[in-house]
Image: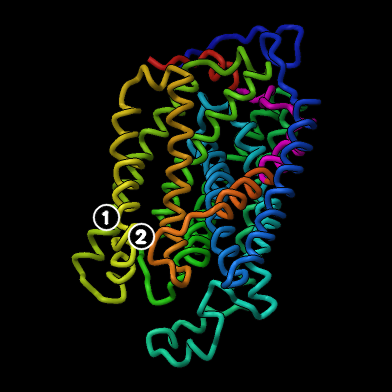
Amino acid sequence: MAKGSKVTVGSGDGPAGDNIRLAEVGQSLFVKAAGVGIVALGISAVLGAGEKDGWNRFSHSYLVAFVWVMTIGAGALWWVTIQNIVNSHWSTVIRRVAELIASNAPVLALLSLPVVLPLILGNPVMYLWADSSLMHESHELANKIGYLNPTFFVIRFVVYFGFWTLLSRFFLKRSLGQDKETEAAAAKTVVTMRRLAGPAMIGFALTLTFCAIDLIMSLDPKWFSTMFGVYYFASCVLAVNSSLALTLMWLQGKGRLTSSVTVHHFHDLGKMVFAFTVFWAYVGFSQFMLLWYANIPEETLWFKIRFANSWGTLSWFLLFGHFVVPFFGLLSRHVKRNRKALAFWCIWQLVMIYVDMYWLVMPTLPGATEVPFALIDLTCWVGVLALFIAGVAYRAKSLNLMATNDPRLPKSLAFENI
């Protein structure tokens, strides 16, 4: 329950004297992360050039890393939007951190270029549907040409990332402006954000669904699932709640938000991680059951490949590693209130989400009858994640890490999870 009380503001930047600015820590993180990201992707490019299939191996490894990082960025935008829709009070103290992560949408757009540019340049690499001759030869695919073509693909990507950029900038700009407003104006800003959040959520649901379809599902243009967008969405919510908990722990380790963010806030984030661990399993099983029951060759072949050889072992590993083990690991409230334990399970689930993205993407690599994990997969993951972190650090270094003038802040600071 939340208890409203008057906030005691100390002599520091934020409530009770809390340090709410990254400052030199943000600058240092930006420089280090950017350097690591550039070096890691450089190594990935060298490794990719040395592969016998050219850039195909690099493209698949890069795509896995990109769609994994996108679960965090897109998930953060959903998180901010839903907090405004429900007029959440408990999350006010940590909402700015999510807003800063969500505002990294332009960086995500830049990171998508290695996926999009080959299509623009006429070298599809991963996406077979970009070859119009192959599409016309297949009766199954000929009817999909109107949607699956490079021009429309690029247009859709401009819409996706354009919408996410505008929406994330709206929330961050309004939130930052609220820090300097009068009490009455700040209350009106809350109403403004709530009014936009409702219709914005519809736009977000559509753009995320079709983006997941375009990036991942269309790798096998003959396969389709009406639940795929929800399946990817489950990973987004799981990823952002895990990332938020870890980010807040890191910030507190650097002396930021040490008093404002309490065990009760971590408890709620832990509950969200647990809830969407179950939701991911529910959606994944529902998708599998419907396709298995229908027994349509175009649909079941997708699973048949992933149940063969070492891919089958990875499928079982996903079932137990992504659901069964963390389900029992996160079940206790004591785990959610213990920061070391919660950090372990958040990292665990982020790793499992990467494995899931790998399981979705890599079987489409030509000749990948076995799990082809290699060094290039690791360097691509490090490179994309590091550049994403650099983008967040650069934006966050000179901004408040808390919405200091939000009228819901007193209740958030006094929040207790019983």
Quarter of the rendering containing residue 15:
top right
Few, some or many C-alpha atoms within 10 Å of disc 2 (few <14, some 14-19, many ≥20)?
Answer: some
Residue 93: x and y, percent? Answer: 59, 23
Query: What residue span does the magenta drawing correspond to?
Result: 388-407
- In the image shown, does 177 or 270 lie closer to the viewer? 270
* Distance between the alpha carbons at the discs numbered 1 and 2: 8 Å
Q: Please give the name of the residue rendered at 53% of the width and 13% of the height, measured from the top-left corner.
A: 414
Residue 224: x and y, percent? Answer: 37, 70
Q: Please give the name of the residue rendered at 44% of the width and 75% of the height, measured from the top-left corner.
A: 221
Q: Please give the name of the residue rendered at 61% of the width and 40% of the height, measured from the top-left corner.
A: 193
Residue 50: x and y, percent? Answer: 64, 65
Mark 2 = which residue?
A: 227
Per the rendering, the mark at residue 286 is 1
Q: Please give the name of the residue rendered at 36% of the width and 65% of the height, measured from the top-left corner.
A: 226
Q: Considering only vertical position in the picture, is 405 above or below 369?
A: above
**Circle 1: residue type:** Ser
